Image: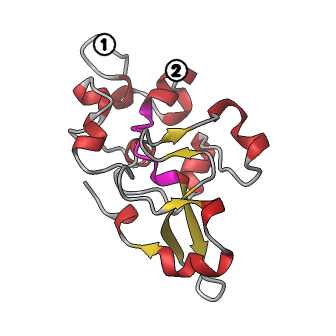
Amino acid sequence: MAQTSQTPFWRTKSLDEMTSAEWESLCDGCGRCCLLKLEDDDTGEIHHTDIGCTLLDTHACRCRDYRNRAKRVPDCVRLTPEAVREIPWLPPTCAYRLVREGRDLLPWHPLVTGRRASVHEAGISVRGRVAGNEEEFTEDELVDRIVGWPGEGG
């Protein structure tokens, strides 16, 4: 289907067909990807914490060094169309996940509202919900920081 000026790109293109600018604009800026996750060794279940990556700006809900993140945080997960198809922990509100599933963006998404702040106003972002960044906690404290809200819908 050809894209028309009235039809948003995320409704007409697959993740693989998007330009770099379109791909980057899909990120709603919620910051949920940047929370530390723990995997249960026995079950493989993923548990989200309220602890941010060392580079997470907890107010802006964005990476403080996006361009160099992989160098500074070696286990940073780079979202690609292939990764989005395989990663089980993307929140149900994630635009990459929604497009992958053939669903539309949610009404609060910045591409829908035209305002970056709408993700925060809708209560979807991590703003005000992060206990701190990973360097502020010991490994033993991580289990006590498991939360359910990163998996909530919006």
Displayed quadrant of residue 2: top left
User: Residue 30 colored magenta?
Assistant: yes
According to the image, label 2 marks what residue? Answer: 21
Callout 1 environment at 10 Å: few (<14), some (14 to 19), or many (20+)? Answer: few
According to the image, label 1 marks what residue? Answer: 4
Callout 2 environment at 10 Å: few (<14), some (14 to 19), or many (20+)? Answer: few
| Numbered circle sitting on residue 154 | none
Q: Can you see residue 105? A: no
Q: Can you see residue 61? A: yes
Residue plotted at (61% across, 75% down): 39
Considering the numbered disc 2 on the image, is that residue within a helix, a strand or a loop?
Answer: helix
Considering the numbered disc 1 on the image, is that residue within a helix, a strand or a loop?
Answer: loop
Q: Position of residue 43 (x, y in %)?
A: 58, 86
Residue 151 versus residue 50: which sits nearer the camera?
Answer: 50
User: Residue 39 colored magenta?
Assistant: no
Horizontal side of residue 93 vs 52, given as left or right: left
Q: Residue furthest top?
A: 5
Horizontal side of residue 92 vs 58, given as left or right: left
Point out the stretch of residues depicted in magenta. Answer: 26-33
- How far is disc 1 from disc 2 in space, using C-alphas? 18 Å
Displayed quadrant of residue 115: top left
Q: Are marks 1 and 2 in contact (CB under 8 Å)?
A: no
